[in-house]
Image (cartoon, grey):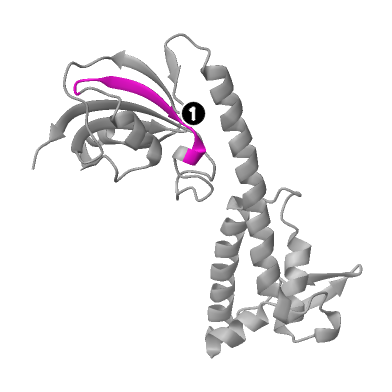
Amino acid sequence: MMATVCVALMGMAVTSCGRQVVNTNVSLKTAVDSVCYAIGMNYGNGLGTSLKAETFSGGQANMDALIAGFVTSVKGDTAAMKMELADVQAFIQQYFMAEQAKAGEATKTEGEAFLAANKSKEGVITTESGLQYKVLTEGKGAKPTAEDKVKVHYTGKLLDGTVFDSSVQRGEPATFGVTGVIAGWTEVLQIMPVGSKYQVWIPSDLAYGPRGTQSIKPNSTLEFEVELLEIVKE
């Protein structure tokens, strides 16, 4: 209850030159004053960090609009509200879903352009699915089937060269089923004889698609260096 009251106090504002601004010139005379100020700093720091990390295609975060929305809401000033409170959550969700979709389309276009240029480079082979690979070392062992489990060393990169995962850096090979990974991996593993090392480029629809992951943007084309060490026998 006290925290709620203190957060509400963050919204107290004065009018200056026709704008609502937060009064930052406050006196911390009591312990309640101080804890409210501390809570305000805590909320503000978290929100500020979030806004700096967030991407708005239309421009920088409008702090005046944010403060105005906060103040009218905590004061319950429905006459001054420019949106219906019941619509706020849906609006926020729709906005960021649209932003993510736009960013995903841009990433997909970038990947398609890269693959179109890459396929004509020396040694690059493009499969019917759109997967691309280049043989760095051709092994002489058996080729895995969909039912097999394999042990591999790999390094995964984004097109800008950022490494997002690497068994090589961890110093320990990975073991998994051939069909227990993204579609691009499933395909290329069945092309590679044991002992091979390939450079592989995987279109987004054979990777993580529009979902992406925590470290991979939606619709990203991925690059891997894959070394097939062995087919693991149970």
Residue 104 point in image, percent of width and height? 60, 44
In which quadrant is the C terminus drawn?
A: top left
Q: Quadrant of residue 139?
A: top left
Q: Which residue is label 1 attached to?
A: 130
Comparing 231 with 163, the one in front is 231
Residue 74: say if magenta: no
Looking at the image, residue 49 lies above or below residue 33: above
Residue reaching furthest to the right = 18
Comparing 185 with 81, the one in front is 185
Residue 14 point in image, percent of width and height? 81, 76
The boundaries of the magenta stretch are 194-205
In which quadrant is the N terminus drawn?
A: bottom right
Residue 32 point in image, percent of width and height? 55, 86
- 138 to the left or right of 87: left
- 126 to the left or right of 146: right
Going by the numbered disc 1, the residue's amino acid type is Gly
Residue sitting at x 58%, y 85%: 4
Residue sitting at x 52%, y 84%: 31
Residue reaching furthest to the top = 122
Residue sitting at x 65%, y 78%: 27
Comparing 224 with 126, the one in front is 126
